[in-house]
Image (spheres, grey):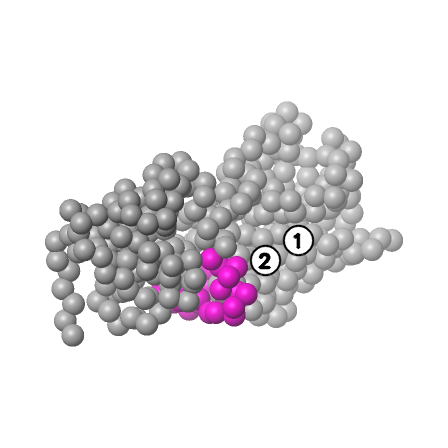
């Protein structure tokens, strides 16, 4: 069968295994004077020519439904706004959609919650992702490094080898010299409660770091184990998520995050401070903590195919360098 896209022929592409998406597809009515509506189940129509158009434009159907009006694509929250603007007023669903999503601001606030509910329902029912972009096939950090990915030395590629939506694990071991100055030392209890960096001064601390992927998300998980003398191992957990291009956020306990930019300058990986944010219901809200906590910075320098050195520090605009840990790691499992 040959599919032809006519003028004012609206296509609604949805996840047929998602109860919310399916109900929306069946209930939606488009104003008669705008066009006719066709619905397309993305799980059953992988060979449809419209799916090729969607994939070419890198629209992730696991991140949101698609509406195509014959010339433009509307993805996720933009699709909801399209439905509110051009949907018919008949029916409870259409009226509710108009009330909730006519405002761009309100749509931006509500949409991450809806997406979270959708993902939770699919996980509960043990339904796999559509993965129309085959994201599992590429490492998480390939798109973060962009064109520089092919220039990275082997040890850095191994370090960042994890794929999204998998159970990949990469493990490194080494030692770090940890330095902490006042006034950060006086915040040690608060930092521990918040799951932050260890507030200690000690040389050659054995450290094991596991980088884990999650089969349900694109997060890159860190699990760090510091073995200080005369103390139980200090565990420091965090997770990273790409925000856009080379901008990444590292989230700690209670949703506090450090935003940074990843670059490869030909000699080393640089993580440059880009502010702080709080993760709240799928939104990353900027918070002005630089004057309180200072700016973060990190480098990773390749040594050989399995070894790299690294340095991380925090510098305050008034008090200078408050914190630093530096050392060397070897990849022991990938």
Quadrant containing the C terminus is bottom right
Q: Residue at x 58, y 67 (%)?
A: 169
Q: Position of residue 181 (x, y in %)?
A: 74, 35
Q: Nearer the viewer, residue 129 or 330?
A: 129
Local packing at callout 2 (Cα closer than 10 Å; few below 14, some 14-19, many 20+) is: many
- Residue depicted at x 50% and y 55%: 117
Q: Are marks 2 and 1 in contact (CB under 8 Å)?
A: yes
Q: Measuring from the top left, give residue 238's x and y in whole percent.
A: 62, 52
Q: Dot 1: within a 10 Å radius of its alpha carbon, few (fewer than 14), some, or many (20 or more) residues?
A: some
Q: Give residue 303's quadrant in the image.
A: bottom right
Circle 1 — which element?
Answer: strand
Screen quadrant of the N terminus: bottom left
Residue 158 visible to the viewer: no
Up/down of 309 relative to 260, above or below = below
Q: Earlier in the sequence, mark 2 or mark 1?
A: 2
Residue 240 in view (yes/no) = yes
Residue at image coords 56%, 48%: 250
| In-image side of 45 versus 168 (left or right) | left
The span shown in magenta is 118-141
Find disc 2 in the rendering and name its residue.
Answer: 221
Going by the image, does 32 lie left or right of 308? left
From the viewer's perspective, tell me whether residue 185 is left or right of residue 287: right
Q: Is residue 50 magenta?
A: no
Q: Where residue 252 sits in the image (x, y, percent)?
A: 63, 47
Total numbered labels: 2
Q: Quadrant of residue 17?
A: bottom left
* Residue appearing at x 42%, y 63% in the figure: 18
State the image coordinates of residue 99 (x, y, percent, origin top left): 37, 40
Q: Secondary structure at mark 2?
A: strand
Q: Is residue 323 above or below residue 50?
A: above
Q: Which residue is identified by label 1?
A: 237
């Amino acid at each position: 069968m040959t599919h032809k896209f006519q003028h004012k022929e609206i296509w609604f592409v949805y996840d047929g295994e998602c109860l919310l998406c399916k109900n929306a597809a069946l209930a939606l009515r488009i104003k008669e004077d705008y066009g006719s509506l066709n619905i397309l189940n993305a799980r059953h129509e992988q060979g449809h020519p419209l799916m090729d158009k969607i994939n070419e434009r890198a629209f992730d159907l696991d991140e949101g439904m698609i509406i195509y009006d014959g010339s433009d694509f509307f993805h996720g929250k933009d699709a909801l706004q399209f439905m509110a603007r051009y949907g018919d007023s008949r029916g409870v669903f259409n009226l509710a959609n108009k009330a909730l999503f006519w405002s761009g601001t309100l749509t931006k606030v509500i949409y991450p919650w809806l997406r979270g509910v959708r993902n939770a329902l699919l996980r509960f029912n043990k339904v796999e992702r559509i993965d129309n972009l085959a994201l599992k096939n590429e490492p998480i950090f390939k798109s973060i490094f962009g064109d520089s990915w092919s220039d990275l030395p082997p040890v850095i590629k191994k370090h960042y080898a994890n794929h999204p939506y998998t159970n990949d694990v990469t493990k490194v071991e080494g030692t770090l010299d940890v330095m902490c100055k006042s006034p950060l030392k006086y915040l040690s209890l608060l930092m521990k409660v918040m799951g932050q960096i260890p507030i200690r001064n000690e040389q050659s601390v054995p450290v094991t770091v596991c980088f884990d992927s999650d089969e349900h998300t694109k997060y890159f998980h860190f699990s760090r184990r510091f073995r200080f003398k005369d103390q139980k191992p200090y565990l420091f957990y965090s997770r990273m998520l790409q925000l856009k291009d080379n901008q990444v956020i590292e989230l700690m306990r209670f949703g506090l995050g450090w935003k940074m930019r990843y670059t490869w300058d030909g000699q080393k990986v640089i993580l440059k401070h880009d502010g702080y944010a709080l993760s709240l219901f799928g939104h990353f809200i900027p918070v002005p903590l630089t004057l309180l906590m200072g700016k973060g910075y990190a480098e990773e320098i390749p040594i050989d195919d399995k070894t790299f050195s690294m340095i991380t520090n925090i510098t305050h605009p008034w008090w200078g360098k408050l914190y630093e840990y530096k050392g060397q790691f070897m990849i022991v499992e990938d």
